Image (tube, grey):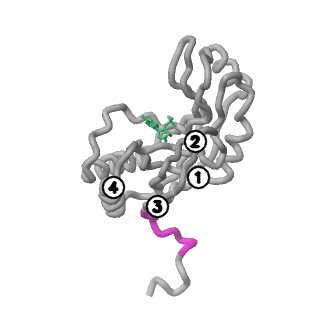
Amino acid sequence: MRLFVAIAMPEDVTERLSAVMGGLDGARWVDPDDLHLTLRFVGEVGRDAAEDLAAALSSLRAPAFPLRLAGFGHFGSGRRVRALWAGVEPQPALALLQGRVEAAARRAGQPAETRKFVPHVTLARMAGAVPEDAVAHWTALRGPFAAGPFEVREAVLFESFLGRDGPHYERRMAVPLERLPDADDWEEGEFC
Ligand code: 2AM
């Protein structure tokens, strides 16, 4: 099975992102329900490796945190952009979570991820040769972009199915993040 660990986007952020998606020739837009921020791509693994990964993830501890999306970016350059994405405001707790997910993957026997972590939410992958100018034009038309903040309360292990209409993802396991007690959550009398 093909696995990755990610943060799913809440509905209001999905709506904000869907509102800007479209209008770029050659772009294959991600299904809004599938929008996510990848923490660790694992790739194709057998059942034993998947079970080891799930076990390592189940012992992961990290705090919940607020996350805000901001701006657009892309991978690839010149005459060939590969992907268009929404960026993420710097958030040390996100880097901490990503580091712990990476450590869990290593404990589960996965090879180290050598690429630098560039947090992003992919909006479109390019079907043909889409030049950087076209992407810059698309970005300029949309003006400044921000969404959230929203509270990241879990990391999710997803299974990816590659189909003719693009990939489709299913949740396999949720890793809850630790929330600091919020005054609003306390029941009356809890302080005795
Ligand atoms: P992307 O959004 O930048 O394409 C599931 O495929 C997720 O894992 C995608 O969000 C994808 O990132 C990410 N990913 C990272 N490395 C990948 C790889 N080598 N192949 C496919 N997806 C990868």
Callout 2: CB less than 8 Å from ligand 1? no
| Mark 4 → mark 3, Cα distance in angstroms | 12 Å
Q: Mark 1 or mark 3, which is nearer the start of the sequence?
A: 1
Q: Which residue is drawn at 60% across and 47% down?
A: 34
Q: Residue at x 74, y 39 (%)?
A: 19
**From which residue to which does the magenta span run?**
178-185
Q: Mark 3 points at which residue?
A: 174
| Mark 2 → mark 3, Cα distance in angstroms | 24 Å
Q: Name the residue under label 4.
A: 53
Q: Is residue 186 visible?
A: yes
Q: In terms of secondary structure, where does tag 2 sit?
A: strand
Q: In terms of secondary structure, where does tag 1 sit?
A: strand
Q: Mark 3 or mark 2, which is nearer the start of the sequence?
A: 2
Q: Which residue type does callout 4 highlight?
A: Leu
| Mark 2 → mark 1, Cα distance in angstroms | 31 Å
Dot 3 crowding, Cα within 10 Å, few <14, some 14–19, many 20+: some
Q: In terms of secondary structure, where does tag 4 sit?
A: helix
Q: Mark 3 or mark 4, which is nearer the start of the sequence?
A: 4
Q: Are marks 4 and 1 in contact (CB under 8 Å)?
A: no
Q: Which mark is residue 47?
A: none
Q: Nearer the viewer, mark 2 or mark 3?
A: 2
Q: Mark 1 or mark 4, which is nearer the start of the sequence?
A: 4
Q: Mark 2 points at which residue?
A: 163
Q: Which of marks 4 and 2 is in front?
A: 2
| Mark 4 → mark 1, Cα distance in angstroms | 27 Å
Relative to 84, does residue 4 appear above or below in the rendering?
A: below
| Mark 3 → mark 1, Cα distance in angstroms | 17 Å
Is 150 colored magenta in this rendering? no
Callout 3: CB less than 8 Å from ligand 1? no
